[in-house]
Amino acid sequence: MKTVLVTGGIASGKSEVCRYLASKGFPVYDSDSRTKALYSSVPGLKNRVEEAIGVPFKEIAVIFEDAEKRAALETVVYPEVLKDFSAWRDSQTADTVFFESAIALDKPIFASLWDEVWLVQAPLAGRLSRNPATAARLSAQKEIDPSQADVIIENDSSIEELHKKLDNLINEMKTDLSKIMSVAGKHGLYKFIALSRNNSAIGEALSDGHRTVFDAHSRITTLADIAIYTDEGEFKLKDVFLSINKALEGKEAPTSKSGEVEIKALFDKAVPNYDPDRFYFSHMKKILDWYNELAQFASFDFVEEEEEAAEESAEA
């Protein structure tokens, strides 16, 4: 499961970004609202906060003006937020979840939570007009260094334009198996980037982003071109992946180094009509390697054939 941090300064539009993502079916953890709920759901938390900051809980807003009190509150509250988010994420079944927070990027306790950072930016004038409290809160929130972000979303126009940008990002999150390559003699999968002038293929490793140039003699196969044999004909690899994902019911898949009994039991459940005379145990292990790499570095939200055709038409 991939975790994306959505961050940005006050009134930058990150909440609108998350609302739109939620409307598209993505699980979103709103750290502000979840933290407020923790004050009521975690026994004794309010008392611990009062002891830490030295004022009654109803005066908690003092933290925005007092850095020491803010730091004291964080030592009490952030471990509870971390536990709550971890439990929430474990309960999700989506390939990608989003964590909304204005401050998490600057807090070491949250550093290992996400795989990618989306930074929402907006002109200061627009931020001030959206939220009158922006000016007062700016001193309490450290401005985010754009170099820390994997994706920067410029919220500098209409809400419709913001939604269009998000639609493009959502489409880019999908896995296009026609551009995922297996190269004979090479470990792991590669994303096709481009053809060079001499028809060599430039591939980017899913695991670490390292780029390699494969010459015209390399034996390259895209995962979209692979199928397995069943009693009813060929079964596309995309559908094999989806069947495995469904059969696992949210559990982790075995690896290619797992026992033969465990691996065959999974395929017996996921693709019970596979042809044992033409689909071998070695094929199962290879598919599991690919499945686990996609699970870790991509997603099982696949680009559909009609989307591929539309993209190819646009490129032409």
Image: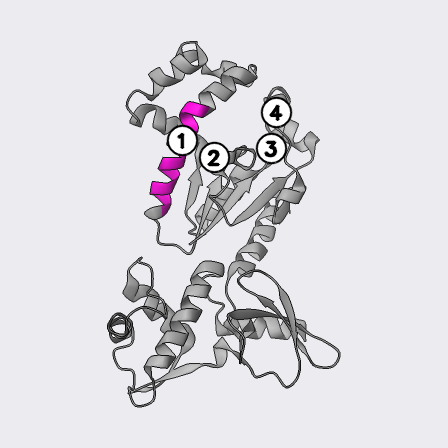
Provide residue 179's location: percent of width, then percent of height.
56, 72
* Disc 3: CA contacts within 10 A as few (<14), some (14-19) or many (>=20): many
Numbered tag placed on residue 9 in the rendering: 3
SS at mark 3?
Answer: loop
Rounded to the nearest angstrom, the CA distance separating label 1 from label 2 is: 8 Å
Rounded to the nearest angstrom, the CA distance separating label 4 from label 3 is: 9 Å
What residue would you read off at disc 1?
Answer: 79
Depth order, front residue of 97/266: 266
Rounded to the nearest angstrom, the CA distance separating label 3 from label 1 is: 22 Å
The residue positioned 36% from the left and 28% from the top of the image is 37
Q: Quadrant of the C terminus?
A: bottom right
What residue would you read off at disc 2?
Answer: 109
- The answer to which quarter of the image holds residue 217 is bottom right
* Disc 4: CA contacts within 10 A as few (<14), some (14-19) or many (>=20): some
What residue would you read off at disc 4?
Answer: 134
Depth order, front residue of 313/101: 101
**Is residue 83 one of those drawn in magenta?**
yes
